[in-house]
Image: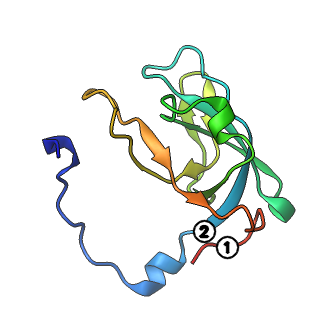
Amino acid sequence: MTAKREQPQKAQITFGKFENVDLRVARVTSAPLAEGTRFPCRVITLELGHLGQRTSVGQYALHTEAELVGKNVVACINLGQREMGSYTSEALVLGAPHPQSPEDQSQATPLFVSPDATAGDQVF
């Protein structure tokens, strides 16, 4: 394991604070590579059922668009917007470090959810 991945455990929080994080099942509908970002990223369009669509920009470039489209992932949808180059990210797709990520990047593998899950459902 690289030193980059050996992060200490974070401080304890209350269950009430955790309940404020809105995690949802999101279905990936497109995931083209972003242009003009500092690190290789994908612009991921997420379908959230009754909650509509959101865009997430993240370092998932080591996965092909075909590997992502149609899959269910876990997304946090209440972090607000974040500017990433010329893109606006409206959700955070949760992931784990990709084993082939270059040292200077944080390429990730998304947390996939069963294909039987319904887009927009709460993750708890």
Q: Position of residue 91 (x, y in %)?
A: 61, 49
Q: Position of residue 117 (x, y in %)?
A: 73, 68
Q: Position of residue 13 (x, y in %)?
A: 33, 78
Which quarter shows the C terminus?
Answer: bottom right
Q: Is residue 122 above or below residue 89?
A: below
Label annotation for residue 51: none
The amino acid type found where label 2 is placed reads Asp
View extreme (top): residue: 36
Q: Position of residue 27 (x, y in %)?
A: 73, 52
Foreground: disc 1 or disc 2: 1
Do residues under tags 1 and 2 come within 8 Å of each other at their CB atoms? yes
Q: Nearer the viewer, residue 116 or 53?
A: 116
> What residue is drawn where x is 33% and y is 40%?
99
The amino acid type found where label 1 is placed reads Gln
Q: Nearer the viewer, residue 63 or 90?
A: 63
Q: How far is mark 1 from mark 2, CA to CA?
A: 7 Å
> What residue is drawn where x is 70% and y is 56%?
26
User: On the rendered structure, is 20 left or right of 11?
Assistant: right
Number of numbered discs: 2
Q: Is residue 107 above or below residue 18?
A: above
User: On the rendered structure, is 46 left or right of 97?
Assistant: right
- Residue bearing the label numbered 1: 122
Determine which quarter of the picture holds residue 121. Answer: bottom right
User: On the rendered structure, is 112 left or right of 7?
Assistant: right
- Residue bearing the label numbered 2: 22
- Secondary structure type for disc 2: loop
